[in-house]
Image: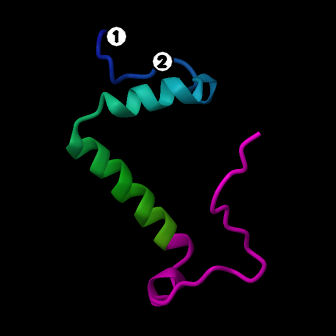
Amino acid sequence: MSNARVITGDYSLLTPEAKVARFRQRTPEERYYVFESHLEMIMGLRPDLVSNRHAAYPQGSVRVLRLSRR
């Protein structure tokens, strides 16, 4: 198979860097399709996310504002 977009073998064996490189090789239309597919899956699993227009940080959350220098 000479197509660079075809993944041979197990996708889970690729390193995160290799997965990013493969994603960057996609056209903007293909990237949008992947985004849209993930969004549909998430909305299918959690339809309540659509009705939550005023999202807030959960109680006890931590936000890092600045890292201390050593």
Write the residue at 41% across / 65% down: 40
Write the residue at 72% across / 50% down: 68
Q: Quadrant of the N terminus?
A: top left
Write the residue at 73% across / 69% down: 62
Element assignment for label 2: loop
Residue 51 among magenta residues = yes
Element assignment for label 1: loop
Residue at the disc numbered 1: 1
Residue 25, percent across and down? 31, 27
Q: Earlier in the sequence, mark 2 or mark 1?
A: 1
Query: Disc 2 vs disc 1: Cβ atoms closer than 8 Å?
Result: yes
The magenta segment: 44-70
Residue 29, percent across and down? 21, 45
Residue 5, percent across and down? 33, 24
* Position above or below: 52 against 17: below
Q: Main secondary structure of the magenta part?
A: loop
Residue 54 among magenta residues = yes
Q: Amino acid at mark 2?
A: Thr
Residue at the disc numbered 2: 8
Crowdedness near tag 2: few (<14), some (14–19) or many (≥20) residues, C-alpha within 10 Å: few
Crowdedness near tag 1: few (<14), some (14–19) or many (≥20) residues, C-alpha within 10 Å: few
Occupied quadrant, residue 65? bottom right
CA–CA distance in space, label 2 to label 1: 9 Å
User: Residue extending furthest top?
Assistant: 2
Q: Is residue 48 left or right of residue 30?
A: right
Occupied quadrant, residue 24? top left
Q: Amino acid at mark 1?
A: Met
Residue 69, percent across and down? 71, 43
As drawn, the label of residue 45 is none
Camera-side residue: 41 or 16? 16
